Image (tube, grey):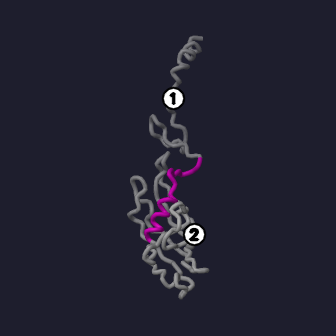
Amino acid sequence: MKIDITNLLNGVEKSLSVDYTLNLDDLSYGTYYPVKDGAKVKGRVFGKANVVYLEADISFKFCGFCDRCAEQVNRDMSFSINKIIVSELANDDDDFENYIVVHDAVLDLDELIREEVQLFLPSKILCSEDCKGLCFRCGKNLNLGECGCKKEVDPRMAALLELLDEE
């Protein structure tokens, strides 16, 4: 969605509502595409004291896999963004995080939302905080119970265990 903010910059309009779903089927996260139903974007672009602001709430359903046990993870995720829209930054040292630079008075909201969703996704997805993962020997999901594999002994302690076995 492209929004012409010329009227907001000139003070002709006070506010523009934003309410749509952005298709993110092609958004890659590792080796899969986790956003199937798109991202719902609801907010507004408004002018106040000759400054243009963007406020939006973004929500989507993440469909992926746990990085420890490879089980399916379906999680509702949401976040908010608050940005100031400017035609240029006065200082190159300004913090780009809070500003959106729009050179031709057209805000490409789709590009911005896509970037914000990518930045919001965690680097590691877990089915739960205490996920035990998979046994590195047999591959059993340890969240479902113990696997029965014999624990490996530290080679530095093997000689001591041999002494205990002799008694």
Res. 51 mark: none
Q: Residue furthest bottom?
A: 12
Residue 88 placement (x, y as % from top left): 49, 70
Task: Kindly identify which residue carries mark 2.
Answer: 82
**Mark 1 and mark 2: Cα distance apart in space:** 54 Å
Task: Kindly identify which residue carries mark 1.
Answer: 150
**Element type at marker 2?**
strand
**Amino acid marked by disc 2:** Asn
Q: Name the residue rendered at 57%, 51% in the picture.
A: 128
Chain part drawn in magenta:
110-129
| N-term-proximal mark, 1 vs 2 | 2
Foreground mark, 1 or 2, reads: 2
Q: Name the residue rendered at 46%, 53% in the picture.
A: 65
Q: Is 98 one of the magenta-colored residues?
A: no
Which corner quadrant holds the N terminus?
bottom left
Q: Quick one: label 1, few (<14), some, or many (20+) residues within 10 Å?
A: few
Q: Name the residue rendered at 50%, 59% in the picture.
A: 119
Q: Are marks 1 and 2 in contact (CB under 8 Å)?
A: no
117 lies above or below 156: below
37 or 17: nearer the eye? Answer: 17
**Element type at marker 1?**
loop
Q: Is 125 one of the magenta-colored residues?
A: yes
75 lies above or below 17: above
Residue 16 placement (x, y as % from top left): 53, 82
Residue 140 placement (x, y as % from top left): 47, 40
32 or 79: nearer the eye? Answer: 79
Q: Quick one: label 2, few (<14), some, or many (20+) residues within 10 Å?
A: some
Which corner quadrant holds the C terminus?
top right
**Amino acid marked by disc 1:** Lys
Q: Name the residue rendered at 61%, 80% in the picture.
A: 49
